[in-house]
Every structure is written in structure tokens, then in C-alpha cells.
């Protein structure tokens, strides 16, 4: 593919990327490497550390290999050995290899803490592009020669292109495409994640407790003195009023799990004092187009698959490469955005469709579904699987152009 990075005038095209989690630094890396001048704006004060283990699988592994990050991420590999599923009384239902549930491949796919991946991506590009923390986009005004951006911190700048990499509740998407409700497909669950003390003796493993409509997870990353805790509960409608109200979030979780046994009361108590509580809904973003004018979306902002697929980070990494490659190949941004979507949409759709199609749904909402899931779990081999799901490798990356090497 002929890449037209500097055809015509020699001025570098300027790109503003909103969001510095996974998709943002990844697309900034590739845009810089393909000859763009990149600024990344992030509302948080720094790149977030810690967090749940996330998976990098299939095509996304080739993206991080091309970035030169594979050895660093292999060193950060968590290598969980066991998931133990428990019933309402805390009795063991089944113990399986984690990859048997998520569809990964032992020895090839990566499992790393989200913060380790975010910091690796940031480190790969921090010296080459401009990062602006503790700020965000307030307004966008597109015109024939670019996009005028007003930032909430008070500054104003003009860029050739804007990339929204700002997650499920994307501010960029809202400004350009309209209210989130148009594209937000709620999947019927809410969750609260936080860190608590590892007083359970867990190492390289997770415990998943279930009763119909509710689940509690304790996940030990290596042999740390802390565990990642997750409380998931079914709810007919998303609690829209709680998204920006931590006290309301804690009240919702307390009410949902009132009267439950096992370690749930201790988890709810720990949640009350946690300084890293992350509350959200299990949802997908589905929209007919990922670009409008000079603005394009990637990652969860474009097509969040939900954490139940385990593919959010992998889709973000792949989408970042595909968008940057298309922009480098086409001087006309409209043609580039259309090419990016044509090449990537099928891969994303296939992975979004993985909801509920795995070997076991983690959080069944009814007694019947829970009993069915348990029977399936008991039929799984405790050994790691030998092959991943086809959806994970359903896209082949365009070759890396020589001039970008």
C-alpha cells in the first residue's frame, strides 16, 4: 500500500486525540510513526495504573509486536492458573483454566494488568507526542481547513483532524454524533470494581461466586497482598442518575447484595472505603458510522464490545493501527475514514457478537441459566485450551510500510 504521508505540502497534519487509556496512546504512536503531529488530551491527572487483568489476543498481539512492546508485556504477563466457580453458599461448582472461559490460547495470548498495558503504550510514545493531562474538549467547530477546539481549561487550538478515543461515555462522540442514548445498548448489568486486601490466600487465580442475577469476583494478580474485587448485578434499566454520584453507586450495590452470604458482606464493606471504586454498566456501543467530517472514533468510543467479551483492549489496539494506516495511505481524510471502517467493521461486529456465545456466561440472571452454565463449566477440561476463538484473529493487519519502520 502506497502511503501518502507527506504528498502535496510538506506540513505535518495535526491530530488531536481525546483519551489516554489504551486506544489513545496506541493511535498516537502509529500516527506519529506515519508522520503526523499528535496531541493527546486526557481529563485525568496521569495514566491510570493498576486495575483488572485484561487480555491481548489474536490480531492485537501483532499490533503490540510491531510496536516493539511484546517483550515488555510478556514480562508483565499475569499467567492466571485457575478460576473457581462457587455457588451461593460458597461451595465449589467447578475449577477451570481461565482461558477455557475467555477463549484465549495459553502460551500465546497475553493477560496483563490494565495499568501495565496503559503505561507501556504511554511509554512508547510519551517522548514523541504532546500529552495534556487534566483537561478535555469542551467544544468542536469544524470548518473547511480544520477543527477549532475549545478546551475546558480555557485554551483554544486548531487541528486538522480529531480522534475520539475517550471510551464508552465518549465526550467526542456526544459532541459530533449526539446523545449517547442513540448508540448505547445496555446489556442488563451494572458492576463495581475496586481493590481490597488479599486475606484469602489467593495467588494467580480468581474466585467467582454466583447466585441468579448477581456475581462477586475476587481476582489475585500474581501473589499480591491485594486482590481485585468485582460486584456485578442485573438491573432492568441502567441507573443513569448514578453515573456521576459515587454515594449513589455504593447505595445501589449495597441494596443489590443485601442478605447475600459467602464473602460478599466483607466485599461490600471494603467497597465503602475503597479509593479506587469504578462503577459502570455492561453495555455495547453500536452506531452506523464511526466518523463525521474531520472526526473519527476508535476503541470503546466507536464500538465498545463490553467487558463480558474480554475484547475491549484488543479491539482498541487493532482499531488504532487500522485508522492510522488508513490516514497515512489516503491524503483525503474522508476517504481514509471510510477505508478504516470498511476494513475494520466486520472484525468489530464479529467480536461484539461474542456476548453469550462462549463456553460459559459468567453472570446468569436466572436460576435456569445458572444451572445450565454450571453444567457447561463442569464439562470443561481443567487444562488450557489449544486454540482460540476465530473472532480474535478474523482480521489481518495491512503490512507495515517500509518508510514507517
Image (cartoon, rainbow, N blue to C red):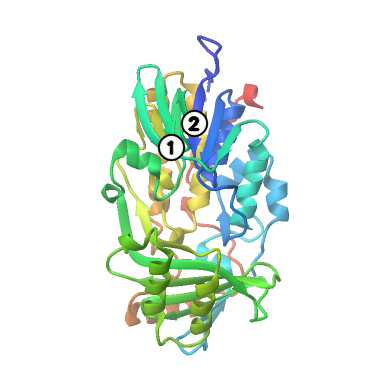
Which residue: 43% across, 37% down?
137
Q: Along the line of sight, which residue is nearer the eye, 263 or 342?
A: 263
Is 255 or 339 nearer to us in this picture?
Answer: 255
Which residue occupies 72% across, 48% down? 71
Q: Quadrant of residue 172?
A: top left
Label pair 1/2, CB-CB below 8 angstroms: yes
Residue 386, given in percent of the width and then of the height, sits at 59, 61
State the mark number for residue 16: 2
Instruction: Name the residue tied to disc 1.
Output: 137
Q: Which secondary structure, mark 2?
A: strand
For the residues labelled 1 and 2, the Cα–Cα distance comes to 10 Å
Question: Whole-percent x and y of residue 363?
Answer: 41, 72
Q: Earlier in the sequence, mark 1 or mark 2?
A: 2
Indicate which disc residue 265 carries: none
Residue 185: give x, y in percent of width and height: 31, 55
Using the rendered image of the protein, determine whether residue 297 is visible from the camera's viewpoint.
Answer: no
Amino acid at each position: 500500500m502506497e502511503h501518502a504521508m507527506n504528498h502535496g505540502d510538506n506540513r505535518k497534519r495535526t491530530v488531536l486525540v481525546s483519551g489516554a487509556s489504551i486506544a489513545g496512546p496506541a493511535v498516537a504512536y502509529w500516527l506519529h510513526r506515519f508522520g503526523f503531529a499528535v496531541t493527546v488530551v486526557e481529563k485525568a491527572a496521569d495514566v491510570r495504573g493498576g486495575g483488572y487483568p485484561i487480555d491481548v489476543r489474536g490480531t492485537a498481539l501483532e499490533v503490540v509486536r510491531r510496536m516493539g512492546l511484546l517483550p515488555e508485556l510478556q514480562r508483565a504477563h499475569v499467567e492466571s492458573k485457575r478460576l473457581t466457580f462457587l455457588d451461593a453458599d460458597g461451595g465449589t461448582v467447578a475449577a477451570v483454566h481461565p482461558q477455557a472461559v475467555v477463549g484465549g490460547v495459553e502460551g500465546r495470548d497475553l493477560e496483563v494488568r490494565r495499568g501495565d498495558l496503559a503505561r507501556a503504550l504511554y511509554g512508547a510514545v510519551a517522548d514523541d507526542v504532546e500529552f495534556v493531562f487534566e483537561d478535555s474538549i469542551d467544544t468542536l467547530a469544524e470548518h473547511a481547513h480544520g477543527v477549532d477546539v475549545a478546551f475546558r481549561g480555557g485554551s483554544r487550538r486548531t487541528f486538522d483532524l480529531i480522534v475520539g478515543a475517550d471510551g464508552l461515555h465518549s465526550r467526542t462522540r456526544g459532541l459530533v454524533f449526539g446523545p449517547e442514548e442513540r448508540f448505547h445498548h445496555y446489556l442488563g448489568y451494572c458492576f463495581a470494581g475496586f481493590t481490597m486486601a488479599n486475606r484469602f490466600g489467593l495467588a494467580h487465580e480468581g474466585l467467582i461466586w454466583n447466585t441468579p442475577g448477581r456475581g462477586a469476583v475476587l481476582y489475585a494478580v500474581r501473589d499480591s497482598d491485594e486482590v481485585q474485587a468485582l460486584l456485578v448485578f442485573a438491573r432492568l434499566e441502567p441507573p443513569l442518575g448514578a453515573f456521576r454520584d459515587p454515594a449513589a453507586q455504593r447505595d445501589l450495590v449495597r441494596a443489590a447484595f443485601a442478605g447475600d452470604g459467602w464473602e460478599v458482606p466483607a466485599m461490600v464493606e471494603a467497597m465503602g472505603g475503597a479509593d479506587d471504586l469504578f462503577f459502570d454498566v455492561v453495555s455495547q456501543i453500536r452506531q452506523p458510522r464511526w466518523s463525521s467530517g474531520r472526526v473519527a472514533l476508535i476503541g470503546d468510543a466507536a464500538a465498545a464490545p463490553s467487558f463480558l467479551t474480554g475484547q475491549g483492549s484488543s479491539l482498541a489496539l487493532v482499531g488504532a493501527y487500522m485508522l492510522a494506516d488508513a490516514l497515512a495511505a489516503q491524503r483525503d481524510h474522508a476517504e481514509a475514514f471510510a477505508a478504516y471502517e470498511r476494513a475494520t467493521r466486520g472484525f468489530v461486529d464479529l467480536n461484539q457478537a461474542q456476548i453469550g456465545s462462549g463456553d460459559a456466561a459468567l453472570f446468569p440472571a436466572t436460576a435456569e441459566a445458572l444451572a445450565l452454565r454450571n453444567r457447561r463449566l463442569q464439562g470443561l477440561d481443567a487444562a488450557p485450551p489449544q486454540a482460540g476463538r476465530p473472532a480474535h484473529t478474523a482480521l489481518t493487519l495491512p503490512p507495515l510500510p517500509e518508510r514507517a519502520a
